[in-house]
Amino acid sequence: GESVGLHLPTLSVQEGDNSIINCAYSNSASDYFIWYKQESGKGPQFIIDIRSNMDKRQGQRVTVLLNKTVKHLSLQIAATQPGDSAVYFCAENGLTSNTGKLIFGQGTTLQVKP
Amino acid sequence: GAVVSQHPSWVICKSGTSVKIECRSLDFQATTMFWYRQFPKQSLMLMATSNEGSKATYEQGVEKDKFLINHASLTLSTLTVTSAHPEDSSFYICSLQGQLAKNIQYFGAGTRLSVL
């Protein structure tokens, strides 16, 4: 079946270091991927997205890399700040791309140490 | 992006009562909204897709008679948890489909439901 999973449940980094959060997906038909950030007690917040016809996309301090060969997605956060502490979810559109539905991974908790 | 307002942010109710959660799109007309449930330290689980003017589409295993969804206007969808029980205690989050970027979902702040 369809699944999106994350390699590590918790990532702890020092403030100022770069963070890399990984995600594996199983549905090779997925053509769209999103990273969301969820702070405690709040709804998910859109960070960055990427289509399957791209390998890399950059935003402000964030970069998403897509490796379709091994069905792997990563989110890189440069110069991690305490405000980056949150749970990060990857999501894919899977086989339901025409419905707008998203399939969410299990999430990685990012802890930033001062 | 899109501005999504969800209300209430937190509700405590007695077992057996019903609770209504509202999700509003503040800056554009949203034909499609989604309702999720999230348990502590878990991911988001899609409950149903709410379409304006038609019946909601529920995911497998979600009781439609227990979780009533009404999308009566292009800016408002409501989720009513009927006859709530302690096992219904969870974080409920709505989202709406982007107006231009339809693959992106924009989320409300969520509603923490505690059933005593």
Image (cartoon, helix red, strand yellow):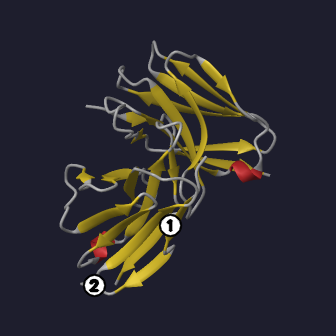
The image shows a total of numbered marks equal to: 2
- Tell me: residue B18, above or below residue A95: below
- Measured as percent of width and height from the top left, residue A93 is found at 40, 33
| Subunit under mark 1 | B
Residue B37 located left or right of residue B5: left
The answer to whether marks 2 and 1 sit on the same chain is yes
Residue under numbered circle 2: B17
Q: Residue at image x 75%, y 41%?
A: A80
- Tell me: residue B25, above or below residue B113: above
Residue under numbered circle 1: B6
| Subunit under mark 2 | B
Of the image marks 2 and 1, the number of the one nearer the N terminus: 1
Q: Residue at image x 29%, y 72%?
A: B81
- Measured as percent of width and height from the top left, residue B15 is found at 27, 84
Q: Residue at image x 36%, y 72%?
A: B89
SS at badge 1: strand
Q: Nearer the viewer, mark 2 or mark 1?
A: 1
Residue A74 quadrant: top right
The amino acid at mark 1 is Gln
The amino acid at mark 2 is Thr
For this rendering, which residue is in front, B88 or A109? B88
SS at badge 2: loop
